[in-house]
Image (cartoon, rainbow, N blue to C red):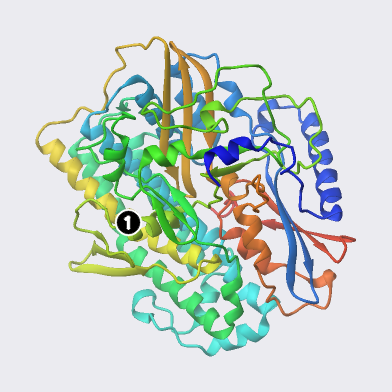
Amino acid sequence: MDLQTIDSVKEHGTSANSDLSATMMRHLRAHNRANLAASVAQADPLARLEGSLAVHCRVDLASRTVIESASMATLFKGYEALLPGRDMRKAGLISAVASGVCGGVHATASALCLEMALGVAPPPLGIVLRNLLLSCQYLNDSCLHLFVLAGPDYSRQVFQRTNPEIWSRAEKAPCHRVQQHGFTHIGDLMAALDKGTGALFKEALQMAARARQAYTLLGGKYPHSESIVPGGVALTADAAKLTEFSAMLRPFAAYSQKASAVWDDVFDFLLETEPRYAELGRAPASMLDFGQWDHPDYYDGSYARCDIWGAQRWSTPGALIDGRLACTALTQLNAGMEEHLDYSYQQRATQSRTMISTDPNGNPISRFHPWNKRTEAAKAHNPHAYSWGSSLAWRGHNFEVGSYARLYLSAAAQTLPRGEHIAADGAGLDFSLPGENGGDILLRWNIPSRWNAFERNRARAYSLAFNIGVTRENIALAEAAMASRNTSTRTPLTTMPTGQHLGVGLWGASRGFLAHWAVLDDQVIDNYQIAIPSRINVGTRTPALVPGPLEQALCNTTIIESCYSGPEDFVGIDIQRAIQSFDPCMDCTAYILTGEGATVLERAIDTRVSAAAT
């Protein structure tokens, strides 16, 4: 569907006929009423900014199928409303707290956005230091997802309860990568994934702490560092700090090899034992990412040249539609964005405003582009709404986001900057990482033939190697800059703009792409919009009735859990695994309706690391 077709669809009109059943819609509306009542009762207004995720699905336990699904963002995530009318220099301080755990990436996206609007380019060392801080946050989050949040779903504790027939085979099945991870049998691996007590669970907490400690060496504090600012970073760095930083991250090369070997063995065993696992979270390979880690020789912050500096990022920008690479140009990725509210409780502002019809390079943009999005309190009931989220599409296509998209797109595009540690050949990625005791650690990730929950998490495991490869490249650049005494880390904001200026921070979080869009009027923020990965993955249906990424993956999921006789002892582990493969960052609950919805099972999804665990 092209831009003109999308623009011709009136939201909440003829195309917005929900395909959800009456049973599901009744449940969703009741849930929304309860959420609103609880929100009104909340004394602290700031506690109402984030909300949570409620994933609803109706299953037929007899046929082991998911009949329908709907992803609900339970509250309006309204922190963008805090920014219009404020001095543009306050944008980073406010938008950085859009997430409780990802402050650094939001601060960077905001800085990139304002650098574009103001025409400011950071010095090379400032760019490199931001890259290094980004890698630390990715390493922290990937360790926690793989072994603390998602990992226990594949543990001995879980398989003994839900699929004892698989557990009995795992106890005897040999591992094929013993040298890489040290476990003899698949059952040993699964025991190491046990929540709270497993060796891999505990080790991941230690490695995540190491990544956070490294972050504080260069960023000052974690997660809400105030050192990332428009123009670079506010803190200085010296050779001693960089040496300590490098040493602290050195164990991650071997750890990335271990992590990828663990998940290769676990997933290969499960697919061989039960081929229906290939349907778990299955979806078209449609994903989008803006690329990550700017190259200091190319990045200048400008929209006019963003296709050039975007192509030199250490992960490649791109859109993949049904497994085919559709675009790698940042301008086209941005211009094709459309945010739809057909199934949302949000309502677009009706006040007449001049629409932005083109980007700064003259490319046409939709009236549904984030630069044009403004909302107001709902004045009319939308009978098709079921979420406070939205549907973010690219040229009419749904897409998912995640750290795995960086591997897939970089491998497919084959345009990575020349370096020592990562190479793409169209079919996958090769990694060469320096080992702690000399010699190189060699790894290979291949583009999978089928996209599903297992492949999302397998690619996340290999993303550790990707991160370390990029980190090593940037440590070398930082060392060279310091050796040549090019130690400036920040370009001051000396010129204040007049008139209207557009900016967009095309960046990412560990869970996928992250973008901040701003419209500036003189020195004041006129409009500010943020797209976060979890809200994209749990987005609603599109105007063409295409389910959101998670919704579609759930409907394709086969229930393989075997140890239940009815709703009273059904765990829903396969549904939980499909949800967890998207790595949602907010509190998340699965509501499983059985039969005609008479029974509703609630299953909490682990999305946060408890204080007790750390």
Q: Is residue 275 left or right of residue 251?
A: right
Q: Position of residue 190 (x, y in %)?
A: 54, 75
Neighbour tally class for label 1: few under 14, some 14-19, many 20 plus, Cα within 10 Å: many
Occupied quadrant, residue 46:
top right
Q: Is residue 26 left or right of residue 605?
A: right
Occupied quadrant, residue 51:
top right
Q: Identify whether 432 is placed above or below 318.
A: below
* Residue, far right: 598
Q: Position of residue 509 (x, y in %)?
A: 46, 44
Kind of residue indicated by mark 1: Ala
Q: Is residue 462 left or right of residue 196?
A: left
Task: Identify which residue, 384 or 442, lies in the foreground.
Answer: 384
Q: Can you identify the residue that label 1 sits on?
A: 413
- SS for callout 1: helix
Q: Identify whether 302 is placed above or below 319.
A: above
Q: Position of residue 147 (x, y in %)?
A: 51, 63
Q: Is residue 330 visible?
A: yes
Q: Is residue 187 visible?
A: no
User: Which residue does the image show at 77% across and 76% down from the upper left?
Assistant: 63
